């Protein structure tokens, strides 16, 4: 497994995203992923699957220190006491004493960011998380968060794939030594049949999805593709035996625009 590195954090370059995976399906996929060599599992309070992720981690018998586990605090738990209480609940469900990475899942303009960040930093001090960070934060919010947080922020997790230009967020993360983690890295399957990605993939004996993931990893971005299909798990992790040329990287980067966002919930921040 390859890693992406930023300041003090080292994250396996490919992880399993578990958004929308529930119950036995979730537990089965996480366990199978760990058997196949995945060492990075991403969950969240709002996914309602932390218990199943915890069961799978235990059933897999992979050593705790060998797997990188992320969870995220949902926006209704951003008041300081709620953040601590809900993180304790997450740890109980996950059957862990600490997670590797604890993120604020979305910005919440109704609770002062400095208060939430203070509580997040405190969760780290209390030993609930090895690293802390944010998710779905724009460049402006990254700047605000970095200035307000008493502890180092290690990550921003955002939607990122070839159809969505995230250059500004990537540069902001690099500026602050934060890792960037990409969710929906294969654009929810929309890249299937894409002419450019398919052509590049054919040159390497790889699929369009593998080209997408490789493109992210070569930019020092960790990708967390989600799949409900066991056979896709292997495909998504078999990306470490080929390399995209500079020209191929540029061709893929040119496909993106600011309008390529697929995840737009009413509560999302205004992206700059
Ligand atoms: C509502 C969850 C989006 C990705 O984490």
Image: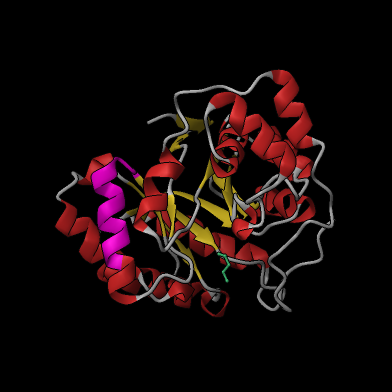
Task: Identify the magenta region.
Answer: 27-39
User: What residue do we see at 72% from left, 70% from top?
Assistant: 264
Q: Horizontal placement of 55 versus 156: left or right?
A: left
Q: Residue 19 in the image: x percent, y percent?
A: 48, 66
User: What residue do we see at 59% from left, 48% from top?
Assistant: 182
Give the colour scheme shown. secondary structure
* 66 magenta-colored: no
Q: Which quadrant: the N terminus? A: top left
Q: Horizontal placement of 186 versus 258: left or right?
A: left
Q: Residue 108 in the image: x percent, y percent?
A: 67, 72
Q: Residue 271: in sight, yes or no?
A: yes
User: What residue do we see at 70% from left, 33% from top?
Assistant: 175
105 up-or-down from 132: above or below: below
Prevailing SS of the magenta stretch: helix
**Which of 139/123 is in front?**
139
Quadrant assignment, res 84? bottom left
240 up-or-down from 97: above or below: above
Q: Residue 200 in the image: x percent, y percent?
A: 66, 30
């Amino acid at each position: 497994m390859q890693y992406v590195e930023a300041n003090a954090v080292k994250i396996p370059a490919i992880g399993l995203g578990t958004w929308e995976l529930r119950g036995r399906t979730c537990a089965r996929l996480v366990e199978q992923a760990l058997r196949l060599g995945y060492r990075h599992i991403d969950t969240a309070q709002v996914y309602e699957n932390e218990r199943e992720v915890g069961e799978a981690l235990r059933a897999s018998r992979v050593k705790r220190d060998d797997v990188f586990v992320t969870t995220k605090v949902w926006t209704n738990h951003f008041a300081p006491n709620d953040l601590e209480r809900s993180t304790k609940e997450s740890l109980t469900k996950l059957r862990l004493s600490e997670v590797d990475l604890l993120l604020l899942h979305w910005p919440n303009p109704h609770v002062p960011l400095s208060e939430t960040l203070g509580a997040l930093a405190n969760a780290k001090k209390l030993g609930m998380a090895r690293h802390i960070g944010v998710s779905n934060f724009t460049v402006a919010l990254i700047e605000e968060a970095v200035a307000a947080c008493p502890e180092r922020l290690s990550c921003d997790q955002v939607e990122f794939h070839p159809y969505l230009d995230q250059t500004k967020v990537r540069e902001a993360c690099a500026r602050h030594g934060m890792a960037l983690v990409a969710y929906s890295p294969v654009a929810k399957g929309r890249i299937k049949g894409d002419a450019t990605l398919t052509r590049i993939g054919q040159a390497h004996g790889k699929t369009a999805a593998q080209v997408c993931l490789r493109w992210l990893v070569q930019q020092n971005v960790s990708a967390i593709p989600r799949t409900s299909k066991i056979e896709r798990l292997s495909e998504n992790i078999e990306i470490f035996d080929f390399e995209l040329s500079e020209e191929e990287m540029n061709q893929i980067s040119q496909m993106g625009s600011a309008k390529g966002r697929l995840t737009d919930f009413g509560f999302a921040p205004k992206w700059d």
